[in-house]
Amino acid sequence: MTGNGAAAPRPAAAHEDLLALFEDRGYARVEPPVLQPVEPFLELSGEDIRRRIFITQDGAGAELCLRPEYTIPVGRHHRATAGAGPAEYSYLGPVFRLRASEADEFHQAGIESIGRPDVPAVDAEILGLALDGLERLGRRDMRVRLGDMGLITALLEALRVPPAAKRRTLRAVAAGRSLDELAAPPAVDAAHAGLLSAIQGQDPQGVRAFVEDVLAIAGISRVGGRSAGEIAERFLAKAAAHAEGGAGLGARAREVIDAYLALSGDPDAAAGAVRALTRGAGLADPGLEAALALFEERNGFIAARGLPLERFTFAGSFARNLDYYTGFIFEVAEAEGAKPVVGGGRYDGLLQHLGSPEPLPAVGCSFWLERLEARR
């Protein structure tokens, strides 16, 4: 399926060679089903993917979707086969997203490492494998951009930013939007005030079920492109902000966050700059210290692998637009400002959302094969 009705091209021999590299490094090839339950993608993917999913139903009326990416399907495969044990996977196959000017069906390759506790070492390994894979495809001297969702989250928590404002800040950063809208509390019209007060502190699953029931009674499945779950999530976020007195970002928090987002350059120098920033702001927080120590340790593992850390760029404003990322993130492109040909990062909370009794460390990346082919 493509935007113009043509079939997507089959993976090239070079792509199979890429998978052979991953398998040689211990990443076993898997191929999760193309049809997947839609709910995990609606709950855990970013809005950019949620609004472009192809949704269908099975004979019993359960909602399914064509696989829009591989990370969640590989996580579900891990839950079904490996449970809580560590495992490493590779994949190559079609994914499906509605796209205005590009094929709706396209191939991706990638790797996922799930369950290994040596977090900074595995982060460096995934980045190194991504660059090795690009070299196997004849791509060298690429631009590498690094970020850290765990570090900015820890900074917001150290600044005591209220939960609703923290969520709005992270989403604004991921979407590349200005934080100006967060300087003031979100508007709540009088018609919604009673509802927001009623759902404050309620179980999110119960609120979601309530919204789904109301929409079902009205014969509505989606509103403005949003599912019932997305609508419920927005109500919960507004209710939290309402309970916090409509708190937005305070002036001090905004100043520190702006300084962090402005950081860009050598990752080692960035680590020192973040430490200076937090000392200047008087932030002595154990969670922030742990996130900074992890950042520095990861830099050490990247350098120890022989990767040119000094040629990579850390950007405080860099965030990927998938909701499940919790830590290290990266993108690789052929030039400044070009679309990435590889992207990935750490998603330690995803497996628990998929049913794991405990959080499992996990990190991976995917290759945009069509972009690589277009540049041959």
Image (cartoon, grey):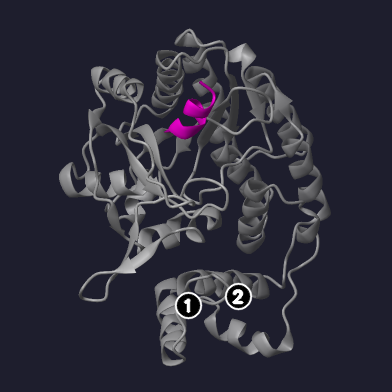
Which residue is the site of mark 2?
239
Q: Is residue 91 above or below residue 171?
A: above
Tell me the residue at 67%/53% (across/down).
172
Q: Nearer the viewer, residue 193 or 201?
A: 193
Q: Amino acid at mark 2?
A: Ala
Quadrant hosting residue 94: top left
Tell me the residue at 54%/19% (across/down).
299
* Marks 2,1: beta carbons within 8 A: yes
First reached walking from the N terminus: tag 2 or tag 1: 1
Q: Is residue 97 above or below residue 37?
A: above
**SS at circle 2:** helix
Q: Amino acid at mark 1?
A: Gln
Which residue is the site of mark 1?
202
Q: Is residue 207 above or below residue 126?
A: below
Tell me the residue at 46%/88% (across/down).
214
Q: x, y percentage for residue 28? A: 22, 29
What is the spatial separation of the Cα atoms under label 2 and label 1, in whole angstroms?
10 Å
Q: Is residue 149 left or right of residue 118?
A: right
Residue numbers of the magenta segment: 367-376
Residue 340 visible in image: yes
**SS at circle 1:** loop
Residue 368 visible in image: no
Q: Is residue 10 left or right of residue 262?
A: left
Q: Is residue 183 above or below residue 276?
A: below
Q: x, y percentage for residue 258? A: 78, 42
Q: x, y percentage for residue 182? A: 75, 59
Count the marks: 2
Q: Mark 1, residues whose alpha carbon is within 10 Å: few (<14), some, or many (≥20)? A: few
Quadrant hosting residue 241: bottom right
Magenta span: helix, strand or loop, mainly? helix
